[in-house]
């Protein structure tokens, strides 16, 4: 008796199937369900999603372009392993761009956005007091989203969001480090206060200082506690 024929999902909307494959693989990489150095193939993902290989290949090519995968001839795609140099490059860009975003945000007079920023900061402090790491992390994302919106520069915001996705798998563990959440809450409070007072120079300085502190702490963790014990990087 032969193997049953696999019935594929309708292929009429190729873009939606490509997005489905893209989101499926990207989330697995960010959550470390797919580990650094691990190989995947378009055939495997197509089988898991019950779709054809064409939209999967397009999705994997896009993830390769964005720095999540590396194509290996004859083996498929390998999950990209972040190095310390990658972290340096990411934070060089973040410090410059996010500093400018904070400066631009300080010029925003939109009352609704300013109220939203205050409320997000309040929730961050509450999450810190409750030692709720997940609530704090979600509020951190929301707070920065509001600052990006206040800056009025969507292109810069998209660049930062793409960079944050690339080091997300490292970032989720950093919040849980002893004292990190409290220190970061204090730094964010200073940034928010200077944005709301309209002091662009100080808002940029404080955002850069926050990111420099984060970079140094991340480097210490990676050099001393992570990189010596992993085969393929992070």
Image (cartoon, rainbow, N blue to C red):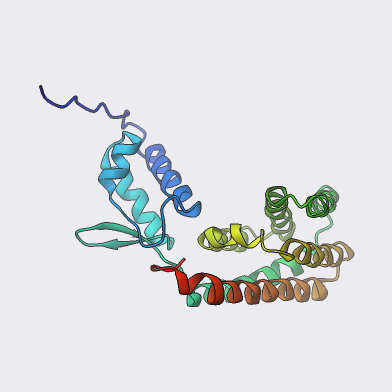
Along the line of sight, which residue is nearer the eye, 169 or 152?
169
Q: As rendered, which of 43 and 66 lies closer to the eye?
A: 43
Q: Could you tell me which residue is drawn at 38 percent across and 38 percent down?
A: 17
* Displayed quadrant of residue 71: bottom left
Side of 96 relative to 21 (left or right): right
Q: Residue at x 72, y 52 (%)?
A: 136
Give the side of residue 117 with respect to residue 44, left or right: right
Specify the farthest residue to the right: 197
Q: Residue at x 53, y 58 (%)?
A: 169
The quadrant in which the N terminus is found is top left
Quarter of the image where one finds residue 46: top left
Instruction: Find the residue positioned furthest to the left.
Output: 1
Res. 96 in view: no
* Residue 82 seen in the current view: yes
Please state the horizontal and vertical placement of residue 148, each as a whole percent of the image: 69, 58
* Residue 121 image point, x, y percent: 81, 54
Q: In the figure, 125 relative to 20: above or below?
A: below
Query: Residue 195 is drawn in which quadrant?
Result: bottom right
Instruction: Pick whichever, 108 or 76, lies toward us.
Output: 76
At 19% across and 24% down in the image, what residue appears? 4
- Count up the numbered dots: 0
Q: Report whether 171 appears left or right of 57.
A: right
Residue closer to the observer: 170 or 92: 170
Residue 91: percent from left, percent from top: 59, 73
């Amino acid at each position: 008796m032969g193997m049953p024929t696999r019935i594929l999902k309708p292929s009429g909307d190729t873009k939606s199937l490509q997005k489905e494959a893209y989101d499926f693989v990207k989330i697995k990489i960010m959550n470390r369900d797919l580990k650094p150095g691990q190989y995947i193939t378009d055939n495997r993902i197509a089988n898991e999603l019950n779709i054809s290989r064409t939209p999967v290949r397009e999705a994997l090519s896009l993830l390769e372009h964005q720095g999540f995968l590396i194509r290996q001839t004859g083996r498929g795609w390998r999950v990209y392993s972040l190095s310390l140099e990658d972290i340096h490059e990411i934070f060089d860009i973040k410090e410059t761009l996010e500093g400018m975003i904070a400066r631009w945000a300080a010029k925003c007079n939109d009352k609704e956005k300013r109220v939203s920023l205050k409320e997000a900061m309040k929730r961050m402090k509450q999450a810190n007091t409750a030692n709720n790491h997940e609530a704090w992390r979600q509020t951190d994302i929301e707070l920065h989203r509001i600052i990006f919106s206040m800056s009025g520069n969507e292109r810069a915001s998209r660049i930062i969001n793409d960079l944050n996705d690339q080091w997300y798998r490292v970032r989720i563990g950093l919040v849980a480090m002893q004292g990190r959440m409290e220190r970061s809450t204090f730094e964010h409070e200073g940034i928010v206060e200077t944005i709301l007072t309209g002091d662009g120079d100080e808002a940029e300085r404080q955002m850069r200082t926050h990111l420099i502190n984060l970079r140094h702490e991340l480097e210490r963790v990676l050099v001393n506690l992570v990189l010596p014990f992993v085969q393929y990087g992070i």
